[in-house]
Image (spheres, helix red, strand yellow):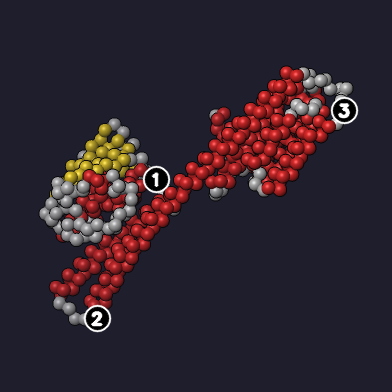
Amino acid sequence: MKIPENIDRILNLGILDEDSFLVKKEIRLANIITVSCSIIIFIYGFINIWKFPIIGIANFIGASLMILTLGFHAKRKLRTGQIWFLTSMGLLLAFVNFISPNTTEYFLISLIALSLLVLRDNISKIILSIFVSAAIIIPKYLDYSFPFLEHVAKHRLIFNSIWGLVILIVLSYYLRSIQKKYQEEIEEKSAQINDLNRDLKHLFAIIAHDIHSPLQSSTTMLKDLSGTQMSNEWKETAIKLVHKQLATLQINLNNLLEWSRHNMQGLQTMPEGIMLAKIVNETLKSMEERFLEKEIQIDIQIDHDIQVYADPIQFTVILRNLLDNALKFSNPNGLIAIKASEEKENTTISIEDHGVGIDQQFIDSLFHTIKDPSFGTSGERGTGLGLVLVDKLIQANHGTVKIKSKPEQGTTILIDLPNR
């Protein structure tokens, strides 16, 4: 395993997949602080061990105790780990400042900044602030000296003060950047929730009209068929109409289910090699009656060895929705051409109709926003969901989609997908 992966694994100790965004960030931040401070104090231990052995030993002991914080985090004892870390560092800095006054003042002040980053409750912050204040003030008013400890040189005190100030400034900026990043993440999540709520309003309208209405109409028609004497011609017409309504209902339900899976983080893409001509023919066969009803001709120009690398079920949903759109907006007796070509690692698929076309100003938003349902050239009602779903599924399969269209001249959909 590479070194960066090991480091990342240490910094993620105690983080679970089900944790919220804020909890994950809090634990990772605590781990970063623990590792960084332990390394710095170990370095100070090596610097001090030769001239100030007692302080050097204290540095090693303190750093070792702080490393144990990661063990608490790994066992999900997060609050215990936070208190352990701050207590270990506080005692170390207070001890060094007591036997060698004025050497760790700014480090002690930095400890308060650390507490703002890792502690949640105000009581713990107040207790720590009182402790730090006492550790700084008491040595200033006590007249004492330790004969076994050599006097700390002035340049060393200046170095410690500068280094402590640097840490304090860095922590302040880091705290501000963390807060800014959290705010940005919250605003992004809020925007996603607003978009989802807007989509849900559209979906409820879709469910009310495109699922409830066909079911109610089909139920009424079947009731009439079973309860009254009708001519064979009328029965045949009624059965065809019920079949058409149920076929449309099935498409709408499949789209709703796929959309729901994606937006509830349940979309699982399992790509495999798919022979394109075969799956196009299978999809067209399932829609054959609708094409015949509108007398639409299909021109397929796909070599039998061309393939795409995608999830078969999702690719079928993509094809069905795009072909449904081409059919819906084609004029009766029209033509739909389906072509494909391979270039290196991608396959390009085009679906071209010669129907009503789309105004340029609406093209950019087609794949990103659920629209009010539109009507085809023979009054076919859509859901407004199909193209949004198509875009999500194509992205999930590492592809792209483009539209070329002009009003009254038709539309061409271009899909690029991997072929290996």
Crowd class of label 2 (few under 14; some 14 to 19; many from 20; radius 10 Å): few
Is residue 192 rendered to the left or right of residue 279?
right
Q: Which mark is residue 270?
A: 1
Describe the element under mark 3 as helix, strand or loop.
loop
Whichever of labels 2 and 3 marks the residue nearer the N terminus, that label is 3
Name the spot of residue 5 as percent of width and height, x first. 55, 32
Observer-nearest residue: 42 or 108? 108
Crowd class of label 1 (few under 14; some 14 to 19; many from 20; radius 10 Å): few
Q: Residue furthest left?
A: 333
Name the spot of residue 33 as percent of width and height, x first. 63, 35
Observer-nearest residue: 68 or 299? 68
Is residue 271 rendered to the left or right of residue 363?
right
Is residue 87 rendered to the left or right of residue 12?
right
Observer-nearest residue: 406 or 283? 406
How many dots with numbers?
3
Q: Which residue is mark 2?
A: 227
Observer-nearest residue: 233 or 13? 13
The answer, for residue 215, to whether it is visible in the render is yes
Indicate which label's residue lies in the foreground, 2 or 3.
3
